[in-house]
Image: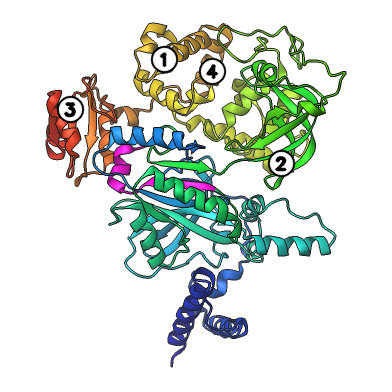
Amino acid sequence: MNAEHQINKLREELKKHNYNYYVLDAGVISDYEFDMKIKELQELEEKYPEFYDPNSPTLRVGGEITKNFETVVHQYRMYSLDNSYSKEDLLDWEKRIKKLVDGQVSYTCELKYDGASISLTYEDGSLVRAITRGDGVQGDNVTANVRTIKSVPLSLKGDFPEKFDIRGEIILPYEGFAKMNQERIAAGEEPYANPRNTASGSLKLQDSSETAKRPLDCLLYNITGDKLGISSQFESLEKAREWGFKVPEESKLVNSIDEVLDFVALWDERRHDLPYETDGIVIKVNDLNQQEELGFTAKAPRWAMAYKFKAEQVSTVLNEITYQVGRTGAITPVANLEPVSLAGTTVKRASLHNADQIMKLDVREGDTVFVEKGGEIIPKIIAVDFKKRSADSTPTKYIDKCPECGTELIRKEGEAQHYCPNYAGCSPQIIGRIQHYISRKAMDIEGLGGETVALLVTEGLITNYADLYELTKDQVIPLERMAEKSADNLIMGIEKSKEIPFERVLFGLGIRYVGETVAKKLAKHYKYIDAIISASEEELVSVDEIGIKIAQSVSEFFSAEENKILVRRLKQYGVQLEISAEKLANQTDALKGQTFVVSGVFERVSRTELKKTIEDNGGKISSSISSKTSYIIAGKNMGPSKLDKANKLDIQIVGEDEFLDTFI
């Protein structure tokens, strides 16, 4: 037997044993035999380096050093999930779904794993990339570390697609977590707080051989890509298992919300028997064509819902109420608590939201309070234990002056929060606005973090985000923890931000109520910042999905002289304040004023491409048919109820070919 054949034979054999042990949990040889085969393969690979394979089982031990994790844009965005807590929430969700899709709707129920979200990209059956969730739009490249996780297949088997992404969670099973903590305690070190945070931290270790020592696992649940040859979510889970992925068997296909709730009840009891953390159930519309019809909101898929198990609750003492100032001047009261363990973390603070909430709960300093950690990341106080209240307790008096600058607070009619109106002179507002401007979803300035922004403001080097573009290397080098290379990176990052597209710059300006989606709508409609500045409130409201509240806020922002000066300065520095010529070249007004409903399965282009074509040519997409619908673009398998409604409203139906060949 020649060396190449022997190496390949050993690799295949070890790959199979690895799959049996780490994915199927059914090892057929002893650990000693496995180790001997690994050793034999290592010796052969060292002797014959010409047969190197990046997916060899011997490379699972890691050793690659990553100083800085590259930021990578997800080809397919990783959305969050909407949460539900009751049968009523699920029934409301189901009603919304059935208004938008035709036919019987079935659901895939899956356990909601509490780990670190990951997206794995496979090409020609090999793992090429592993990216953390990040902000959903882009994440960090942690491929070297993920390659060390034994349950992640480096190469696939069976009839897998040419290219696809598969999403899941990197988790740390209870048993492995307990063993790690035993070792840390024995070494005189602090134990880790909880499995989820430890799993997440493991992905960002600079030395992949250290990641390899941790008993991480990877559970997969969602395949994403084009032309996958899969018609349902449940089928995709079965296919993923066939290709070699670790997909938990607990998922179930059901036909009603009652069956969903039976599944929830079962796993609310049995989840404590699982080897890893879960905090709820994810319910997905099973049919992928129906999923495509339903689409996404700005933040979450319409076709999926997370049902959260009842939140954990503890009681502790509220020591003090303090107040934080946000970038918009909004004041947030914070409860500073006697530290208490809740859902695997030590809780020291909880949000009190606003003055109305404090009054409603009648919460006071010194009270024993009940704290809950439900769907929110930040724990909240849900009630006071009045039996334990001191006789000399006094009601909480909400502050009337800014805790940072002493300015008299204001509270606008109909709003819950108090605000500090000292826009230009209140330090947390100044720092917060600049931190928002440099954030990942806005200008994404590499080398500049929140702490550095605070330092730049404190040192008097900047007072607004336009000042960033006047910073020099000589100015920033003397700052604390600022070496020559980091100073270079900061200045280069600021320079590179001039390439960021207009819609993200608009979001970065920090206009109240103008989030990512609204910024995109405004940028697309007006194309230039000057057109937005000169638009009246009435004109702004006429833009798709822009309400009076947003219009007033935009108008108010640009009527302020200091903001006009900021915009003029950003223009001078070369920041993108208009849609690029390249983008404009691909956009027309051919479909302006027309509303389209896209339904069915398409062959020439994907549904996403079809919708983009409509929007690029000035048209509007609607998810449901109404009297305002101009046309329905129908692919194969368009639902009968949509067809019936279109006929009743006398709405013209066009096919994919007719639309692509004659409308544009």
- Residue with the mark numbered 3: 631
State yes or no: discs 2 and 4 in contact (Cβ < 8 Å): no
Secondary structure of the residue carrying tag 1 is loop
State yes or no: discs 2 and 1 in contact (Cβ < 8 Å): no
- At horizontal 36% and vertical 45% (from top left) the residue drawn is 256
Answer yes or no: is residue 612 visible.
Answer: no
- Residue with the mark numbered 4: 512
Quadrant hosting residue 150: bottom right
Q: Is residue 418 highlighted in magenta?
A: no
Looking at numbered disc 2 in the image, what kind of residue is underneath it?
Glu
Secondary structure of the residue carrying tag 4 is loop
Mark 4 vs mark 1: which is more N-terminal? Answer: 4
Looking at numbered disc 1 in the image, what kind of residue is underneath it?
Gly
- Residue with the mark numbered 1: 547
**Label 3, label 1: how many angstroms apart (C-alpha)?**
25 Å
The answer to whether 200 appears left or right of 596 in the picture is right
Quadrant hosting residue 177: bottom right
Mark 2 vs mark 1: which is more N-terminal? Answer: 2
